[in-house]
Image (cartoon, rainbow, N blue to C red):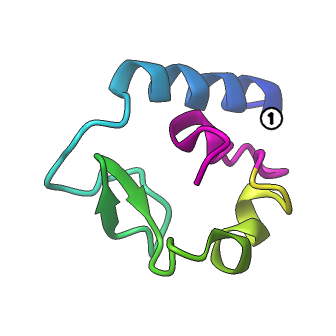
Amino acid sequence: MSRTVATAFLVALGLLVGCSDSATVPADAPEGHTVMKEGVPHKSGLKNPQENCSACHGANLGGGSNGEPSCFLCHGRKW
């Protein structure tokens, strides 16, 4: 699957699922993403995203090079 298609899929999935509460981590969540925050699986350390999330989600958290979604899809520009 191309990166563009994968990114589009993730964005569409995010729009369908939204950022609502959920009790379980989805089966397709990346390894280590076990902290549920507003229905979305996060990795521990999510309160310091520049240090803990930027390696995958990009230096500016706008999305990773392997199709990882932008953090701003749910968080907006204000953190």
Q: Residue furthest front?
A: 78
75 in magenta: yes
Residue 1 coordinates in the image, percent (x, y): 73, 31
Quadrant in which the C terminus appears: bottom right
User: Does dot 1 land on a helix, a strand or a loop?
Assistant: helix
Q: Residue, x 72% and y 72% (percent of image)?
A: 50
Dot 1 surroundings within 10 Å: few (below 14), some, or many (20 or more)?
Answer: few
Q: Is residue 17 above or below residue 51?
A: above
- Lateral position of residue 17 relative to residue 71, left or right: left
- Lateral position of residue 40 relative to residue 7, left or right: left
Residue 62 coordinates in the image, percent (x, y): 78, 45
Q: Residue, x 68% and y 48% (percent of image)?
A: 68
For the image shown, how many numbered marks are present on the structure? 1
- Lateral position of residue 51 relative to residue 10, left or right: right
Helix, strand or loop for the magenta stretch, by majority = loop
Which amino acid, mark 1? Arg
Residue stretch rendered in magenta on the structure: 62-79
Q: Residue, x 46% and y 21% (percent of image)?
A: 15
- Among the 4 quarters of the image, the one containing residue 42: bottom left
Residue that carries the numbered disc 1 in the rendered image: 3
Residue 34 coordinates in the image, percent (x, y): 34, 70
- Among the 4 quarters of the image, the one containing residue 5: top right
Residue 56 coordinates in the image, percent (x, y): 73, 64
Q: Residue furthest left?
A: 23
19 in magenta: no
Q: Residue, x 33% and y 69% (percent of image)?
A: 35
